[in-house]
Image: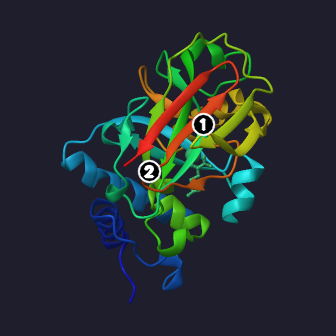
Amino acid sequence: MKHTNEELALILDSAAENAKATAQISNSQAITIEDAYAIQATSIAQRYKRGEKLVGLKLGFTSKAKMEQMGVHDMIWGRLTDDMQYQNGDDLPKSKFIHPRAEPEIAFLIKEDITKELTLETAPNFIEGIAGAIEIIDSRYENFKFSLEDVVADNCSSTGFVIGDWLSPNTNLSDLKIELKVNGETVQEGSSNAILGNPWESVIAAARLSLQYNEPLKKGMILLAGAATSAVFVQVGQTVEAKIEGLGNIKLDVK
Ligand code: OOG
Ligand code: MG
């Protein structure tokens, strides 16, 4: 059966709210990338109606590791709300999610509203802080499988994130060792350079996309640059930790 974009948005929102997987849209109907971003916006509007606030944006598929793991080869962006944020060391209640995965991230804190495209030279002027982070992704689709359009419509699997201590925007981001640990054991390893060659390129890309899609990156908002490594499924009883050279450790206990 074919659905309207509005109907698809409501299906995805309710899959997220009830932690119950839904069928991939692309299994039954073709949508364009424009449809997918419109569905994402309508679906997130349901969260706003429930009182959630937009606190940031995220990029996806900025590294080869992620593109290869998920079989999707274009950069995507999604929205982060206050309800998705956890504090470092928090418990992560697995029952709120369908099949959550964790991935190590680098986060930027926006210092000034970004109203124009940026370059490697100008981007630092718009950044207040840099931090290590973990993103929890939870595709609303069965078996965590999707096309590019499917995942964009599903707000790029966004479901949770936790940010470490904010450090100076002058903090070195070049070739930092990034590890994801489960119960103290390293399960994924990569370099910050895996993120578009330089994580600052994510700030530039996010500025461009936010202007293109008219979702401004404003002072105080968070940007997740996209994972440098593949994501791992998390299970109850695990401690999941991101260790990012120079940016510290970020941890969640899956309960
Ligand atoms: C989509 C989200 C991708 C990243 O950091 O690349 C993403 C997914 O893998 O489910 O957040
Ligand atoms: Mg991510």
Q: In this image, 158 relative to 44: left or right?
A: right
> Residue 188 versus residue 67: which sits nearer the camera?
188
Q: In this image, 44 relative to 242: left or right?
A: left
Which numbered disc flags the more N-terminal residue, 1 or 2? 1
Q: Secondary structure at mark 1?
A: strand
Q: Residue at x 51, y 16 (%)?
A: 166
x and y percentages locating residue 220 in the rendered image: 41, 21
Q: Secondary structure at mark 2?
A: loop
Of tags 1 and 2, the one toward the viewer is 2
> Residue 101 versus residue 153: which sits nearer the camera?
101
What's the distance in space between the residues labelled 1 and 2, CA to CA?
22 Å
Location of the N terminus by quadrant is bottom left
Q: Is residue 2 above or below residue 158?
A: below
Residue that numbered label 1 is attached to = 105
Q: Residue at x 53, y 42 (%)?
A: 240
x and y percentages locating residue 199 in the rendered image: 70, 30
Callout 2: few (<14), some (14-19), or many (20+) C-alpha neighbours within 10 Å? Answer: few
Q: Is residue 180 above or below residue 164?
A: below
Q: Is residue 176 above or below residue 181?
A: above
> Residue 89 versus residue 46: which sits nearer the camera?
89
Q: Is mark 1 within 8 Å of ligand 2?
A: yes
Tally the marks.
2
Q: Is residue 73 visible?
A: no
Q: Amino acid at mark 2?
A: Gly
Q: Residue furthest left?
A: 50
x and y percentages locating residue 139 in the rendered image: 48, 62
Q: Amino acid at mark 1?
A: Glu
Q: Residue at x 76, y 40 (%)?
A: 190
Residue that numbered label 2 is attached to = 237
Quadrant of residue 33 in the image? bottom right
Callout 1: few (<14), some (14-19), or many (20+) C-alpha neighbours within 10 Å? Answer: many
